[in-house]
Amino acid sequence: MTSTFGDEQEAGRLDVDSDEVGRWATGRRSVLGALREDPFWPTRRPLRVASSIVNGSGRPGPIPPGPKGLPVIGSWIPYYRNPYEFLRTSAAKYGDVFRVPLPLHDLVVVSHPDDVSYFMDSTTGNYSMFGTTQGLFRQIGRSVPTLEGEASKERRRMLLPMFGRRHLSRVADTLVEEFVSRIDRWSVWAGTGQYVDLQHQIARVTLPTFLRTMFSTSISDEEIEQIDTDIRATMRLGATYLLLSPPPNLIPFPGVESAPRSLLRLVMQMKRIIRRRRENPVDKPDLLSILLEARYDDDSALSERDLIAELIVLIAGGYETIVAALSWTLALLLRNPEHLERVYGEVDALKGAPPGVADLPNLSWLKACFDEGQRLQGAPLNWRFAMQEDEIGGYGIPRGTFVATSLYVVHRDPRWWGDDADRYDPRRFADPARARSRPRLAFMPFGSGPHHCVGTGMAYMNAQFLLSIIFQRYRLSAPVGWNPEHRFAFSTVIKGGLPVTITRI
């Protein structure tokens, strides 16, 4: 696999290839070569370096270019402060494959869609989302993201009925009914001039709606707030895993919130819901009933641990990520009134009726606006662990390397998006010929390969429904001069929320 990020980067790659260390130097020679290219490596991985020198093994070379950073912490400080622009600046400086030295592991970032496909779409088992930590999930419960190979394929087959067109059509009316009921409550702020954090309010709409779709049951506002708090605390553990968030409180002192206490509350809540359902089955199938009835090839059911893990992951992925993506879409639309007016024109064609599945093809501009919002939202990292020694873009990838792509970088790459890549323009997605001209993975908000999001269809349906219902009822205004800023909270949310005033149409 080869790709370039300009003549300067290709020249740099050739310089590395001609280094006296050799293209695939091994043993002590490769240790010395790695030290020459990354002199602070021993301070970050002292045991590995010592072992390499003693046993004559080493890391394959040449290693990708990248910042040298500082002893022990590497480039963690600028990476942590603003991972989005740090990775973008590094890609522009070092090329399509570059290395970021970090305290616990090196991060290799890949930016060309062909190289991204090589590791994201791999079905050989060479790349895993959670690497050697999979054993931990066998103890606490395994969900789709934590499974690999045939186990992942089998579990995904069990989940597909939940997100197929037939089931989505069955739950569409429930979604719309709940969306309308909760969005209508925003009228209390209409005309008051009061700024409302719409990012938070969208969460209060999507979470109960998704829970009702999953569990066919109403849920109190207090329970919604608690589940929201606990999901976010649990997801912060993931941000810590990527070294992009300070560690959450892990010690459950009495009266003090902690990640373990949040996770325990979630587990106990799922246990109660499962128990109630087994005692009181429902006639109309929902997501929980599909999971309870799902069977492996040997006709065995999901264990309770796996069922609980799957439910928690589905809640997090089914509402929290859509909250972030919708918030970015709304924020960017409010900064671009010419595109927003076209939204109102498309929504007006519904003639005030709630949207339905049959209306989705006619809400294509809304879908384009949502995709463009997701593009500029971006995510700092979509990662895998290298389970075997490999090569990407001409560079050696040692076993255990943290390999990732940055959607923020790829989604703003001028090679695919033009010199105005930072500008919000939904026409990039409204023109099919323009969309086909880009490489397949130049846009990948739902991932790719074995870990592609199974709920993509539901995400788009939710987004089109929510946007159309909002714009049927209200005009929104953000503060003059306000612009959204990125903040990593496992998903990419708007820093400080989305402040708007609301006017009833």
Image (cartoon, rainbow, N blue to C red):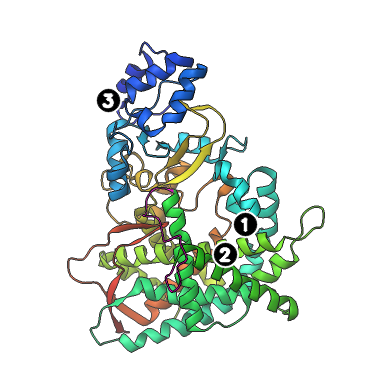
Q: Is residue 244 on the magenta stretch?
A: yes
101 inside magenta stretch = no
Q: Which numbered dot is residue 140?
A: 1
Q: Determine the CA span between mark 3 and mark 1.
A: 48 Å
Residue 353 percent location from the top left of the image = 48, 82
Q: Where's residue 375, x and y in %?
A: 38, 53
Q: Residues within 10 Å of mark 2 (few under 14, many from 20)?
A: many
Q: Which residue is mark 3?
A: 8
Q: Residue furthest left?
A: 481
First in sequence: mark 3 or mark 1?
Answer: 3
The C terminus is located in which quarter?
bottom left
Whether residue 25 is visible, yes or no, is: no
Camera-nearest residue between 55 and 193:
55
Count of labels shown? 3
Separation (CA) of disc 2 from disc 3:
46 Å
Label 2 secondary element: helix
Task: Give the residue drawn at x 34%, y 28%.
Answer: 65
The quarter holding residue 196 reads bottom left
Q: Amino acid at mark 3?
A: Glu
- Circle 2 residue: 312
